[in-house]
């Protein structure tokens, strides 16, 4: 609801991240989702930092002349958000909602102004630099044919009976299993922190997309399904924190626990809940006019993360 096309920068990754920030703020605005406020604030804090780093990386890649000034704006907002988050955590009773209202007001106002003035200015510069670079390369040599993307391996924990019949959903489930396999591989211990962060982010986006599709198709078990997502997200964060706090000698044991619980939960959840939802979704889609099926809910919501 807060997103407007005027915020488009033309840089797809940045625009999608901006939209996700607005989606999370909308959760804070919804009084029916008060139980999700703490985890949403934590997600917002982490996601803002990731988004800022991505943006700053793009600016460095094209030698953006205002990169340092832009970085200071990011740092100032991060500090302000941390203050407001602490204010919420220290408040009680009705003051908590007042604190959330203040966070919403500050975050929305800052995002809108920052995107319209600073991010759009950078986006214009970035596209100009890339266009100039492409022109130079094009003049120097003909374009190479695109390389075919190598198919991803089927994860070892995957079984045919886990297929829901919805390709985007099944591919995302397989990706979750692939990432868990990295945690179990002792030869890839250097990838563990990055993999845990990826899993945490990917799980959140996958669950969020699934929940929005369920709401849009009036899935009768949507609230129960959403609670299962929340419970797993909370458990995963607890296990991740346990791993990070563990003694070096105990870290692989902590990883084994994460892997065991994640694999078991995923299999059970897919078999008993996701397949039930998939049946509902396919029935819903079969009743839609043919022209509306090609780019239905799952395509629009799951495609960016497929």
Image (tube, rainbow, N blue to C red):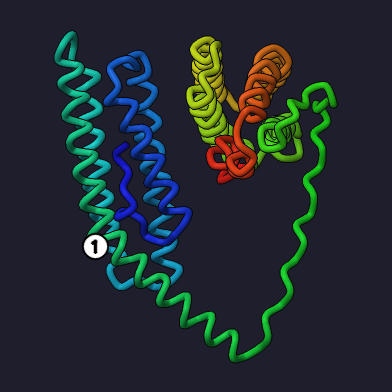
Q: Tag 1, which secondary structure?
A: helix
Q: Return the residue nearer the eye: 204 or 283.
A: 283
Q: In this view, does 270 lie above or below 300?
A: above
Quarter of the image where one finds residue 117: bottom left
Q: Return the residue nearer the eye: 223 or 267.
A: 223
Residue sitting at the far front: 289
The residue at 24%/55% (across/down) is 72
The residue at 72%/36% (across/down) is 167
The residue at 43%/62% (across/down) is 58
Q: Return the residue nearer the eye: 127 or 258.
A: 127
Q: Is residue 10 above or below residue 88?
A: below
- Residue 293, given in percent of the width and then of the height, sits at 62, 39
The reply, left or right, for residue 18 in relation to residue 154 is: left
Quarter placement of the C terminus: top right
Whether residue 238 is visible to the viewer of this picture, yes or no, is no
Whether residue 192 is visible to the viewer of this picture, yes or no, is yes
The reply, left or right, for residue 294 in relation to residue 83 is: right
Quarter of the image where one finds residue 8: bottom left
- Residue 4, given in percent of the width and then of the height, sits at 31, 48
The reply, left or right, for residue 30 in relation to residue 46 is: left
Quarter of the image where one finds residue 95: top left
Quarter placement of the N terminus: top left
Q: Is residue 75 above or below residue 275?
A: below
The reply, left or right, for residue 274 in relation to residue 125 is: right
Q: How many labels does the image show?
A: 1
Q: In this view, does 299 lie above or below 64?
A: above
Q: Residues within 10 Å of mark 1 (few under 14, many from 20)?
A: few
Give the residue number, with chain letter if any, for mark 1: 69
- Residue 204, given in percent of the width and then of the height, sits at 51, 30
The residue at 22%/24% (across/down) is 100
- Residue 154, given in percent of the width and then of the height, sits at 82, 37
């Amino acid at each position: 609801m807060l997103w407007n096309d005027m915020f488009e920068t033309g840089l797809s990754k940045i625009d999608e991240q901006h939209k996700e920030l607005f989606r999370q703020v909308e959760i804070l605005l919804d009084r029916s989702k008060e139980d999700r406020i703490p985890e949403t604030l934590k997600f917002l804090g982490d996601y803002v930092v990731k988004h800022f780093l991505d943006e700053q990386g793009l600016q460095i890649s094209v030698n953006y002349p205002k990169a340092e000034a832009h970085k200071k704006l990011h740092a100032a907002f991060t500090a302000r958000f941390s203050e407001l988050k602490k204010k919420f955590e220290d408040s009680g009773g009705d003051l908590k909602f007042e604190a959330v209202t203040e966070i919403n007001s500050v975050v929305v106002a800052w995002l809108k102004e920052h995107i319209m003035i600073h991010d759009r200015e950078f986006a214009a510069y970035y596209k100009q630099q890339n266009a100039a670079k492409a022109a130079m390369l094009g003049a120097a040599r003909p374009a190479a044919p695109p390389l075919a993307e190598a198919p991803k391996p089927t994860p070892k924990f995957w079984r045919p009976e886990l297929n829901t019949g919805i390709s985007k959903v099944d591919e995302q489930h397989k990706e979750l299993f692939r990432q868990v396999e990295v945690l179990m591989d002792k030869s890839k211990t250097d990838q563990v922190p990055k993999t845990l962060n990826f899993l945490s982010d990917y799980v959140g986006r996958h669950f969020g997309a699934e929940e929005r599709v369920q709401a849009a198709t009036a899935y009768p078990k949507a609230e129960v399904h959403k609670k299962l997502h929340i419970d797993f997200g909370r458990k995963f964060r607890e296990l991740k924190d346990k791993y990070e706090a563990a003694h070096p000698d105990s870290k692989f044991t902590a990883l084994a626990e994460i892997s065991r619980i994640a694999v078991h939960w995923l299999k059970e959840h897919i078999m008993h809940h996701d397949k039930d939802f998939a049946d509902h979704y396919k029935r819903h889609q079969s009743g839609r006019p043919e022209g509306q099926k090609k780019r239905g809910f799952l395509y629009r919501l799951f495609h960016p993360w497929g």
